[in-house]
Structures are given as C-alpha cells and as structure tokens.
Amino acid sequence: MAATLTEAAVDKSTTASATDPAYAARISHVSKSFGRPGAQQLVLDDITIDVAPGEFVTLLGASGCGKSTLLNLVAGLDKPSAGEIEVPGGRPALMFQEHALFPWLTAGKNIELALKMRGLAKSERRDEAERLLEIVRLKGAYGKRVHELSGGMRQRVALARAIAQDSQLLLMDEPFAALDAITRDVLHDELTRIWRETNLSVLFVTHNVREAVRLAERVVLLSSRPGRIAREWEVGIPQPRRIEDSAVADLSIEITEQLRGEIRRHGQH
Amino acid sequence: MASTETTTSDTPDAQPETRPDAREDARPDARPDAREAPKENGADLAGLEAGLDALETQTAQRTAFGRKLLSKALPPIVAVALVLVLWQLAYHFKVKEHYLLPSPADVGRTLQEKWLEGTLLDYVWTSLSRGALGFLISVAIGTPLGLIVARVKVVRAAIGPILSGLQSLPSVAWVPAAIIWFGLSDATIYAVVLLGAVPSIANGLVAGVDQVPPLYLRAGRVIGATGLNGVRHVLLPAALPGYIAGLKQGWAFSWRSLMAAELIVNAADLGVGLGQLLEQGRELQDMSWVLSAILLILIVGIGIELLIFAPIERRVLRSRGLLARG
C-alpha cells in the first residue's frame, strides 16, 4: 500500500491521466467574499492548492486569513465565489476545534451514526466502531458518554468518527487548539501514527507554526485579509518527529519570520 | 522538481541549502520505512496515552442512597409540615369562622368520608383520564406544529408570534366560546384542554430546536446526516431537552385548562371529575369539601410531574452530562 502511495505522489508530477485521480483535493483559483453586493469583503483570494493522495498539508496563517473558510469550502459546507474545488474521493471528513460529538449518544454510537450514514450494514457497525476506537486507542470507551471523556479522549473519538466516514480526505480545523500542551503533544504523535497507518490525505488548519511543521509534509502559509498563499515549504524532516526537534525549531523560526512579516504589513496601512 | 514544487513566491536562496535535499530523501524513501514504526515507540505512546486518560478521567462520586433521600425528601416534608402548623394555628385562633376555615383534620375527615364512599378514585380517574387523553392529543398536534414553525421560515413569521401569544392567554377564556360551539359536552372540555396545551408544547419544541448548537448541525452534515436523516438523527435528539421541558409545561397547561373547563362545564350526563367535585362543594357551601378537592387537584398535578416528567427529564439531562450530581 505504501508503494502505491508514493507512486501516486510521483505520478502527480509526471502524468495526471491515471485512472486514479492524482490528487485528493484540488483547489484551483478559489476566491470567496462575504457580504451583500456592493459592500463585499474578500476573504480568500485566488487560492490554488493540490493535496496529493496520502499527503499531509498544513494551512498556516494568522487571524483573518480565511483558513477555516477555506476548509468549509472544501468540506462542501459553503460555495466558493470563484474558482473550483474538486474532491474526487467523495465527501471529505471534517474535524472541528470542538469535538462536535453528539452528547445524546455514547462514544461508540457516535461512530456508528457515521457508519450508518456511510451505508454500512447494521450487523457490521458495532465491530467496525470497536475497531475504530482501537485505532485511536480508546478500547473500552464504546459505552462511555461524551461528558465522561476527557478533552483529549473526545478529540480521539471525533477522529475515529471522521475516519469512520471512509473518506480519502480528512480536513482538520485546529482540532487540538483547545487542548492542554501535554495532551496536544500526545495527539500529534497519535495523528502522525494514524496518518501513516492509513492512506488518508490530510488538510490541517492551524495558527501554531510548530504544530504545522511537526505534522506536515508541506506547510502552506496564508497571508491575511484577504487570504492569499504567501509561500509554501516542503518539510523534509523524517517522521517520527518531535515538536522539540531542532530541525522542527529551525524551520519554525524561518516560517515565523515570514508570518510576522505578513502580519506587520497590516500595521502599516 | 524541488524548485517547481516547493517554491511559489519565494526565492530559492531564502531556504537553507540542506532542506530540499533532505526532503528528497525523506519523502519517497523515509516514509515507507517509517510506516513500520518502531514497536517500542508505539507501545510507549500507548502507555503514555493510557496514563493521560487515567489522569484526566474523573471518577464519579456516588453519595449514599440514604443521605440522598434525606437531603431530597426532608426539605419538602418540613415545608408541608410548616404550612399545616400555620393552618392549624389560624384555625385555633379563629382567624375566620370555622365553617369558613376548617382545620386540616376536618379536611382530612372529608377526604376519608369520600374515600369510604368509594367514589373518590372515580373522580380522580375521570379527571386524570381526560387530562391524559387531552395531553396526548395535544402532543400529537403540537409536535409536528412546533417542528414546522421551527424549521420553515414563512410559517414561523406567520404564526410564530401568535403561537407564543396564545400561551399567555388563560385557557379559561376559551370556555365560553367552546360552550357556544360544542355545548356542555366532553368536546368542550377537550377543546379547552387542547387550546391550552398545544401552543405550550409547540413552543417548547421551537425553543428546543432554536437552542440546538449550530455545530451539531454542521457535524451532522459532514457525516452525511442531511434532510430527513438530519432531522431524525441530529435535530430531534439535540432538541430533546427543550422538547421535554415543553411537554412538562404542556401537561401543566392541560391539567389547568381541564380544571377550568370542568368547573364550568357541569352536566348530569358528563362524568364527575375533580373540577365538578370542587363546584359541588361550592354549591353546598362546604369549605372542607372545597379544600379537599383543591388538595386532590394539586396532588394529582404534582404527582404526575414527580412520577413521570421529572424522572424522564433527569435521565435525559444526566445522560448528556447536563445535570450536576448532588
């Protein structure tokens, strides 16, 4: 599976005419404005990003760069004002900053609802939910209510629910921003592990530079108001990484400098 | 490949020389290797996570059943006892003549007499079955009505304000109209009950739907629960606490409206309910009788609330972690 994955990634740069699409998501020249006609505010301006199959991309930016708006567009929760978004693998999974689990269901039933909506037969749902809980290392949490779980556990159930959708593409909207630093660090390891064990493509939004570098194969920096692609970095640091690694720190410093430059421009006018 | 892919708006020399090379190695080769992650590392992570989970999970503390009963049951018992004492004192010092203000014991005796006549449960049952039937019909009408008002903008703009306005209209005001329409019949009684309870139930559901966090609806759409699936699996369960509050209030309105109707709609061929019992007591100028009937009406209303609605509400709230223990 790993081999086909890398092949697909290579394919992307050579021929795009393979039977499998060479991208998990193609965002081409997407713009988005809000407001009524005449008084429109441009939020995203000409964004073009391809996410390769199995690739992990982080979208990084300060407030007002429209990164969450972009994720909503890719998730199909909103429509772009201009440009096109193609997601060949079907409806993408989306994880929010809040766990967004349904409190009237147990952890297991939350996952089963996603399986049901995916069309999985009733007899298979229970086993599949247990299997997904095991993937996020929450064996035994099937019957737990959402409020009985800690913040980190809730996000892991939310991750299991997202994986349950069996989508090629996982969108993550600052999913660890509300967690404490220790838990976040562990979940970084966890997410990296799961990403490598599955063939998911991930588009991960964050304002945390180190998090972006810690996780991603590619970091895309967005400028703010309107959101434009300022620059991209390929992160060549081999996984598994730690957020404390000096290579992670070096690249983070470089990206932070650029990010600060982008922010400074807003103070000048 | 490196330059075409990595750089969009930057100049190549802005990056350290080593990075693109490292990436070249890292992407195609390092990843498949790394996929077979060192087992030890994985076990470490699992252990770390298990520890974190254990630290962050709070074990619920259960209070002893006896103490819980004591802290829940004692205050209302004391309150009732206090009222009885004040009542007895008022009787003792003859605040009013005894035929105007009988003692608690007098009222108890009247209740006992009625009980021994064997008719008391019939009165209660007549009212209770009317109230229950009226309530159930109200639920059947109020639920779809509330759902439509909550979800369809035009309908909401049209009848939303009227619906919440109706709630403040005392249902006894419908009694004369209902008598003119239906005469002294069961239909009149049910009409008044429905007009009292339906708006309350519908409004409860509207409030419940309004309070559903938009995040749940978005999460539902993301996992594919749209349309009817969205209503069934996300919207309705999310609105359940508000809906139950509406049902509770709907029952209170049913019961109140029923008593108002029974007081006025008094005919020989209609069954005698608690309202009619109360009216008979007034006709006979028997204050003990009147107070007995009031007491029964109160007890039935509180009883239904405590035995049916309170446990359901507690269960729903507790399962969602919305109820503080204690």
Image (cartoon, coloured by chain):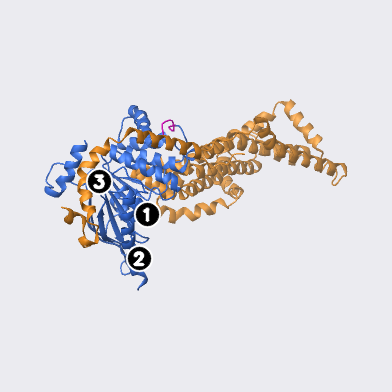
Chain colours: A blue, B orange
| Marks 1,2: beta carbons within 8 A | no
B320 or B144: nearer the eye? B320
Residue displayed at 88% across by 44% down: B93
* Residue type highlighted by circle 2: Ile
The kind of secondary structure element at disc 3 is: loop
Magenta segment, principal secondary structure? loop
Q: Is residue B255 left or right of residue A156?
A: right
Residue of label 2: A263
Counting residues from the N terminus, which is met first, the one under dot 1 or under dot 2?
1
Residue lying at the far bottom in this picture: please name it.
A269
The span shown in magenta is A137-142
Q: Looking at the rendering, which quadrant does residue B311 occupy?
A: top right
Real-space CA distance between mark 1 and mark 2, rounded to the nearest whole angstrom: 14 Å
- Residue A55: numbered disc: 3
A260 or A16: nearer the eye? A260
Residue of label 1: A208
The kind of secondary structure element at disc 1 is: loop
> Is there any visible trace of residue B134 in the rendered image?
no
* Residue type highlighted by circle 1: Asn
Real-space CA distance between mark 2 and mark 3, rounded to the nearest whole angstrom: 28 Å
Q: Is residue B264 left or right of residue A267?
A: right
* Residue type highlighted by circle 3: Glu
Real-space CA distance between mark 3 and mark 1, rounded to the nearest whole angstrom: 19 Å
Counting residues from the N terminus, which is met first, the one under dot 3 or under dot 1?
3
Badge 2: few (under 14), some or many (20 or more) residues near its Cα, within 10 Å? some
Residue displayed at 44% across by 53% down: B156
